[in-house]
Image (cartoon, grey):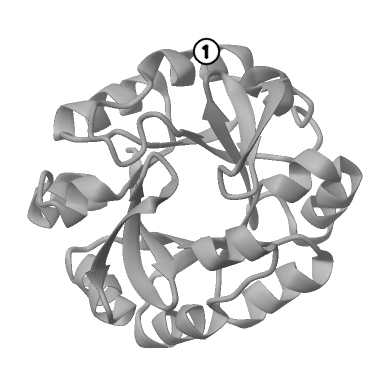
Amino acid sequence: MIEIIPAMDLIDGKCVRLTQGDFSRQTVYADEPLAVAKSFEQAGLKRMHLVDLDGARTGTPANLATLEKIAAGTSLSIDFGGGVKTDDDVAAVFAAGAGIVNIGSMAFRERATFLSIVAKYGGDKILLGADTRGGNVSIDGWQTDTSVPILAFLLKFSGLGVTNVFVTDIASDGAMSGPSLKLYRSIKAAISEIKLVASGGVQSLSDIDELQEIGCSGVILGKSLYENQIDLKELAKYAG
């Protein structure tokens, strides 16, 4: 069964969503992230994807206090990312209550360091984040585009202890235009053993079902939940 993972993006300690990664197209949904997290927990969901957008922009985690509050106030397993650049950052995120740490830009720039962190903590504790725009990898909170194809990037980590990956198609994120099914099919075809979490564009239960058929282990939901395109109650069949 595919795992439903609600997303929460943080700026200045508030719950926000960006459209296609554009910081100028920002909507604030809640001043108190803990209340939102509790609504996910009450719906029977077990995990949450927490993105520190301030950290992604500045290069160092900036919302650890909010992570601590949510971790202490709920039983959710939290995967946290944004600005994680060093082993010390990883340790700080775990100390603040995260169950999994998401790493993207550092894996792109410092592959050896990233692999050493995977070896230290285990593949089940580190989630490789790979964001793509136009088929190529994008880093630094989607602010820096590269010329490296997404599949070529992921293949560099195949068989090296990296077991969990989430891939976001930036063009789909926040647009509720449907997920990039072709992209996820190509990744699963090339790296069948990877646990792949899809992110971006999901607008309906049928989208979730299609991702499950492809073989995705999880799906991150954001705007579709905040805009009530998908009702939390409808997700019970996956949560159970």
Q: Quadrant of residue 15?
A: bottom left
In the image, residue 222 lies at what x, y percent? 29, 50
Structural crowding at the residue carrying mark 1, measured as other residues with C-alpha within 10 Å and reported as few (<14), some (14–19) or many (≥20)? few
Left or right for 101, reference 53: right
- Callout count: 1
- Amino acid type for the residue under numbered disc 1: Ser
Location of residue 71 with respect to 236 vertically, above or below = below
**Label 1, on which residue?**
186
Question: Which quarter of the rendering shows the N terminus?
Answer: top left
Q: Nearer the viewer, residue 130 or 206?
A: 130
Q: Quadrant of residue 32?
A: bottom left
In the image, residue 161 lies at what x, y percent? 77, 40
Left or right for 50, reference 210: right
Left or right for 105, reference 192: right
In the image, residue 208 lies at what x, y percent? 25, 32
SS class of the residue under badge 1? helix
In the image, residue 8 lies at what x, y percent? 37, 62
Q: Residue at x 20, y 45 (%)?
A: 224
Q: Residue at x 78, y 52 (%)?
A: 118
Left or right for 141, reference 72: right
Q: Nearer the viewer, residue 224 or 73?
A: 224
Q: Is residue 240 visible?
A: no
Q: Residue at x 49, y 78 (%)?
A: 67
Q: Residue at x 59, y 82 (%)?
A: 96
Q: Is residue 67 visible?
A: yes
